[in-house]
Image (spheres, coloured by chain):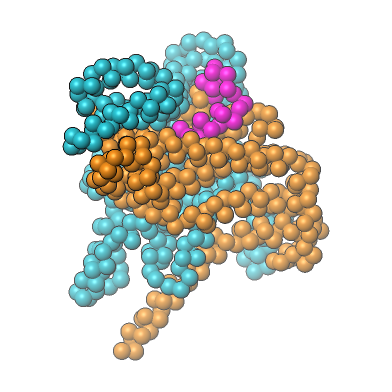
Amino acid sequence: MPGPPDLRLQAVVPPEASSQAGAAPGGMRLYSQATRAGATRPGRHQQFVGLLTIAPALILILSLILYPVAYSIWLSLLEKHSFFPQQRFIGLENYVYLWGDEEFWTSLWLGVVYSFWTILFQILLGVAAALILNESFVGRGLVRGIVLFPYMIPTIVAVILWKWLLNDTYGVVNYWLLALGIVRDPISWLGTDEIMLSTIVMSIWQFFPFVLLSILARLQTIPEELYEAAKVDGASALRRFTHVTLPQIRGILFVVILLRSIWMFTKFDTVWLMGEGAGAGRYIRTLPVYAYMRTLTYYQAGLGAALAVIMFAILIVSTVLYFGLFREEADIG
Amino acid sequence: MNRWRVRYLSSRALLYGGALFLVLQAAFPFFWMVSTSFKPPREIFAQPPAFIPQDPTLENFQRLFTATNFLIYFWNSLTVSGLAVLLTMAVSAAGAYSLTRYRYPGREKIAGLILCTYMFAPIMVVIPFFILVKKIGIENTHFALVLAFTSFCLPFTLWLMRAFFQTIPIELEEAAMVDGAGRLRAVIYVVLPLALPGIIATSIFTFILAWNDYIFTRILISSDELKTLPVGVQDLFHSALIDWGLIMAAGMMITIPALIFFVTVQRYLIRGWGAGAVKG
């Protein structure tokens, strides 16, 4: 940065600093150091103001996200009631217990099943829908707005909508299936046999617009000339997709699959609310739901934390593997 | 020639068919919710169900507003989301400005660290978060909720705002400062107006996250009069006989503010998404 503006900068620093010092504990000490050294070295001022303006964000993230993550690792080594202060250090006993816990393995498996199918169809539907909405047709703007809507509504609304649609006695889905003669007896969509399927379908409905939006944003930046050149060369629509579109969206696809996998594997509210009150909740008790129940139904905070740590470990290992497998895409992304 | 025409027409038909499917799958559940919320009980359980209420009534809404704490939940949701938006905007604008305009050791590391936390899901931190909040003594307050939402939005909003600030030429601010404006005034009058789409995208993202949140409110809030909509409405399910008319009316009332907010600022969201997605 050139000299003159920096000189003016110094004049601005004191009021800005005093107004923010309250928000950033420790800021005062930094500030006095900066004034002493800063009078001769403008670079210090730069550093000081820079650190001061990032401080609120950094403090919030460190204390409210990273500290809790670190604390849950410690918590997983304790036997602790969720609400009362007594606690006892028991080392790795929580993990040993979970290793032999059948419910843990079931929840891990259910979580994998749920994530796999929801991610697969979100990506397929999302990309297909993005390709459609990237073409020009009458009413495209309106369609775009409507399609994004399921992603924007509160999960509780999505859940009550689907529970009403799928209601076994009065639901409109069963009514249609019966009226069209597709089934003879009403299907118990929220019963033990079908609840996983219902939850998966509902989750795809709720979350594929995220994929759609991300892919669409990228599609719009692909230069039209690439397609025209391909057309001149006589490439079919399919070949244009595999040779022009796919290489262009590979980077963003890499990121989207990663984010969606992380979010579906740790998805709590959709699964929990779908299972609650349905009586068949046990058949969609995925890992996040199991962690929640251990902590807030059985009040075993230590075990709940151990489950959270295991989830976290699985995510880290899978992410590293994913980056290793798709190194090329990671560079583009 | 004719073959090309057939091919063109069939591809258009496919396109419109696809678009129609997309609209129906997204819109039908909402249509059904609206329709049910205006039906009297007898019609709600009628077979075959009618698409349009034959005898439309407002009694579901009336019951919602008088017999439940819905209006209190609504007001709580509004204040908590509004405060979370303000706090997130201030903190992420300052942070993103710092990440793009100042040079200091560890800057790139800080940016990387912040992006990494984007991966954390609430379920992984909510328990220790609860214990922490209890230690500080702010459990069962809206303040705790605002802090929770802000810190969970920050990784994404910082990323987004950083992408926007990067597109604003530094020379503009320098020109303003050469003309005698202080840094703060240059930021307020030059940088922030140019970053408006980013600020709007940030506020939409935060508002929706806060408005929709279930898990933080479920765990941090215990008194009924402090609950926000998602948790309050879930509790309507706990009665022995589910009052579908009432619940659909509640669902509609939660959806409307999000819908208005979303429709008015939608185009900024797509633009913001593009900026974030392309950079990432």
Q: Furthest-bottom residue in view?
A: B2
Q: Is residue B251 left or right of residue B277?
A: right
Reply above or below: A146 against A78.
Answer: below
Q: Furthest-front residue in view?
A: B180
Residue nearest the viewer, comparing A314 with A226: A226
Q: Read off the magenta span.
A: B130-154
Total marks shown come to 0
Residue B141 colored magenta?
yes
Q: Residue A62, position in %: x, y?
A: 40, 25
Q: Quadrant of the C terminus of chain B?
A: top left
Dominant SS in magenta: helix
Q: Residue A156, position in %: x, y?
A: 61, 45
Residue B92, image quadrant: top left
Q: Furthest-right residue in view?
A: B42
Q: Which chain is cyan?
A: A
Q: Residue A314, position in %: x, y?
A: 39, 33
Residue B51 colored magenta?
no
Q: Is residue B171 visible?
A: yes
Q: Is residue B155 left or right of residue B146?
A: left
Q: Which chain is orange?
A: B
Residue nearest the viewer, comparing A133 with A21: A21
Q: Residue B246, position in %: x, y?
A: 74, 49
Q: Quadrant of the N terminus of chain B?
A: bottom left
Residue B234, image quadrant: top right
